[in-house]
Image (spheres, rainbow, N blue to C red):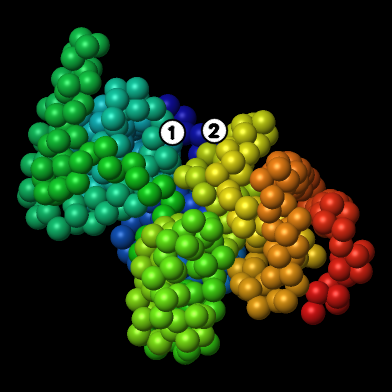
C-alpha cells in the first residue's frame, strides 16, 4: 500500500496544528494548556519525555505556563515529524508502522488486534500505555471507541498506572501482555453478552499485576487535577498547604483567599470556634494559622479565586463539580449556560456578591484570567465595599431573587464575552460592568480603573 498520501496528510496536519495552537495561546486557560502538554507527552518515548519536560510543572502560573507551552509546541512538532518520517520507512501496515499520534487516535480493539498479529511490534513505553488504557475500558463500546486514549489522559490514575507498570520486571510485563492477548483474542469471537465479562477479566488482570488497591470505578475521579508531570514537579511559586517558611503577611493573604471561596455557612462552621479565642484573623498565631490554611485547602478541593471568572471558558465551576475544558469546548452554548446556571443556584448571598464584584473589578479582559489580578482584589477597599453594597441591597429574603436575576444576567453575558471575537471582548465586558453599576446605583466614575485605587 502506498503510504505517500497518508504521510503527507499527517505532515500537513502537524504543521497546521502548531500554527493554530500558537495563534490561540493567549486565549487558552491554564487547564487547556495542561491538557495539550499531557496529550503530547503521551506520544513521547521515555528519553524525549525526560528531556522535553525537564523544566515543566503543572503547577506553573498561567503566564509562565503559556511561555513554556509556546516553546514546547514547536519542539514537539519536530519530534512528531521525525517519528512520521521514520515510520514512513517501515514496511507493511502493522502496529510498528504507526506513529504514536496515530496510535493515540485508534481504539484499543484495533491496536490489540494488530499486536495479536505481531506481538513484538511495540516499544516498552507503548505497551505500558496500551495496558493502562485497557483499565479505562469499562464497557465493550469504550474498548472499540477511538476517542478513549485521548479521554484517558484527563485522569491522574492513567499516569499513576503507567508509573506502577514501570516497576514490573521486563519478563513479567511480557507475560502480562501474553495473558491479555489471549483474552483479547477471545473478545472477537465471543457472544455479545459475554464480552463485558471478558473485558472485566482483562481489567482485573492488569490491576492485579500492579497491585492496584483502589476500585476500578475510582480511576475516573479527579479529571484534570494537577499531577506531578515533568521535571519540576510542584512549582515553588505555587502556594500549597505546606505553609512552612511563609511570612505572616503571606499567611494572612492565603487565609483571606480561602475565606473568599467559602459560603456563609462554611465560614460560620469553620470560624465560630476560632472567634471565641481570636476576634480577628490578625490575632491568630502563626502555627494555628498554618493548620487552619491546610485544613481549609483540603476541604475546598479544587476551588480557586479564578473559579469565579475562569468557569466561562474552561468549565471549572465555583461550587459544582466541573468538567474538563476539552469537553467544555465541545458543548453547545445552551448546555454550557445550563451548567453555569446550576452552579449559580448553589451559590449563597456572599458568593454571588463576590462573583459580581470580581467581574466589575476586572476593568481589563485579561484580568479575568490573571491569578495575580484576582488575588490583588482581596486588598482593594472597593472590592470589600462592593460586596457590602450588594449584601446590604439584597440581604432581605424578599430581595434575594433580584440578586439571583442579576447573577443570571452577568453569567449569560459573560458566556457571550468568551464566545466573542478577541477584539470585541473588552467592549462587551465594559457593557456588563456598566449594567452592574446601574443596578447597584454605583457612580460611573468607578468604571475608570484609576477610581479603583
Residue identifier under label 1: 147
Q: Residues within 10 Å of mark 2 (few under 14, many from 20)?
A: few
The answer, for residue 78, to whether it is visible in the render is no
In the rendered view, would you say 341 is above or below 410? above
Q: Which x, y percent locates residue 297?
A: 41, 66
Q: Quadrant of the N terminus?
A: top left
Q: Which x, y percent locates residue 278?
A: 45, 81
Foreground residue, 420 or 189?
A: 420
At a point 39% along the width and 27% down the height, the residue shown is 145
Foreground residue, 36 or 32?
A: 32
Q: Secondary structure at mark 2?
A: helix
Q: Which x, y percent locates residue 37?
A: 47, 56
In the rendered view, would you say 233 is above or below 414? below
- Kindly identify which numbered label has been placed on residue 5: 2
At a point 24% along the width and 50% down the height, the residue shown is 161
Q: Secondary structure at mark 1?
A: loop
Q: Residues within 10 Å of mark 1 (few under 14, many from 20)?
A: some
At a point 54% along the width and 61% down the height, the residue shown is 261
State the CA–CA distance, disc 1 to disc 2.
23 Å
Q: Is residue 428 left or right of residue 347?
A: right
Amino acid at each position: 500500500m502506498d503510504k505517500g498520501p497518508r504521510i503527507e496528510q499527517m505532515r500537513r496536519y502537524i504543521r497546521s496544528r502548531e500554527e493554530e495552537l500558537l495563534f490561540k495561546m493567549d486565549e487558552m486557560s491554564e487547564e487547556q494548556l495542561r491538557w495539550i502538554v499531557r496529550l503530547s507527552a503521551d506520544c513521547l518515548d521515555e528519553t524525549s519525555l525526560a528531556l522535553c519536560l525537564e523544566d515543566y510543572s503543572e503547577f506553573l502560573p498561567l503566564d509562565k505556563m503559556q511561555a513554556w507551552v509556546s516553546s514546547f509546541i514547536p519542539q514537539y512538532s519536530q519530534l512528531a515529524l521525525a517519528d512520521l518520517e521514520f515510520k514512513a520507512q517501515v514496511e507493511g501496515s502493522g502496529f510498528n508502522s504507526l506513529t504514536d499520534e496515530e496510535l493515540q487516535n485508534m481504539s484499543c480493539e484495533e491496536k490489540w488486534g494488530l499486536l495479536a498479529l505481531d506481538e513484538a511490534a511495540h516499544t516498552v513505553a507503548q505497551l505500558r500505555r496500551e495496558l493502562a488504557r485497557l483499565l479505562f475500558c469499562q464497557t465493550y463500546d469504550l474498548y472499540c471507541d477511538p476517542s478513549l486514549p485521548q479521554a484517558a489522559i484527563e485522569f491522574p490514575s492513567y499516569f499513576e498506572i503507567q508509573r506502577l507498570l514501570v516497576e514490573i520486571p521486563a519478563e513479567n510485563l511480557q507475560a502480562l501482555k501474553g495473558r491479555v492477548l489471549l483474552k483479547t483474542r477471545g473478545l472477537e469471537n465471543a457472544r455479545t453478552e459475554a464480552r463485558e465479562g471478558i473485558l472485566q477479566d482483562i481489567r482485573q488482570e492488569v490491576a492485579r499485576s500492579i497491585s492496584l488497591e483502589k476500585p476500578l470505578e475510582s480511576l475516573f475521579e479527579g479529571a484534570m487535577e494537577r499531577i506531578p508531570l515533568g521535571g519540576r514537579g510542584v512549582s515553588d511559586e505555587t502556594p500549597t498547604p505546606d505553609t512552612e517558611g511563609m511570612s505572616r503577611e503571606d499567611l494572612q493573604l492565603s487565609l483571606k483567599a480561602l475565606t473568599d471561596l467559602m459560603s456563609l455557612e462554611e465560614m460560620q462552621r469553620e470560624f465560630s470556634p476560632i472567634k471565641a479565642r481570636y476576634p480577628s484573623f490578625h490575632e491568630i498565631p502563626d502555627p494555628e494559622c498554618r493548620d487552619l490554611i491546610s485544613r481549609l485547602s483540603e476541604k475546598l478541593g479544587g476551588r480557586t479565586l479564578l473559579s469565579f471568572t475562569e468557569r466561562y471558558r474552561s468549565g471549572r465551576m465555583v461550587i459544582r463539580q466541573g468538567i474538563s475544558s476539552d469537553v467544555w469546548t465541545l458543548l453547545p452554548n445552551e448546555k454550557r449556560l445550563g451548567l453555569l446556571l446550576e452552579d449559580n443556584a448553589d451559590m449563597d448571598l456572599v458568593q454571588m456578591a463576590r462573583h459580581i464584584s470580581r467581574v466589575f473589578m476586572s476593568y481589563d479582559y485579561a484580568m479575568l484570567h490573571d491569578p495575580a489580578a484576582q488575588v490583588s482584589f482581596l486588598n482593594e477597599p472597593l472590592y470589600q465595599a462592593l460586596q457590602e453594597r450588594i449584601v446590604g441591597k439584597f440581604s432581605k429574603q424578599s430581595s434575594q431573587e433580584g440578586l439571583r436575576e442579576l447573577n443570571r444576567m452577568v453569567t449569560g453575558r459573560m458566556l457571550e464575552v468568551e464566545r466573542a471575537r478577541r477584539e470585541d471582548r473588552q467592549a462587551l465586558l465594559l457593557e456588563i460592568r456598566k449594567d452592574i453599576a446601574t443596578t447597584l446605583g454605583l457612580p460611573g466614575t468607578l468604571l475608570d480603573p484609576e477610581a479603583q485605587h
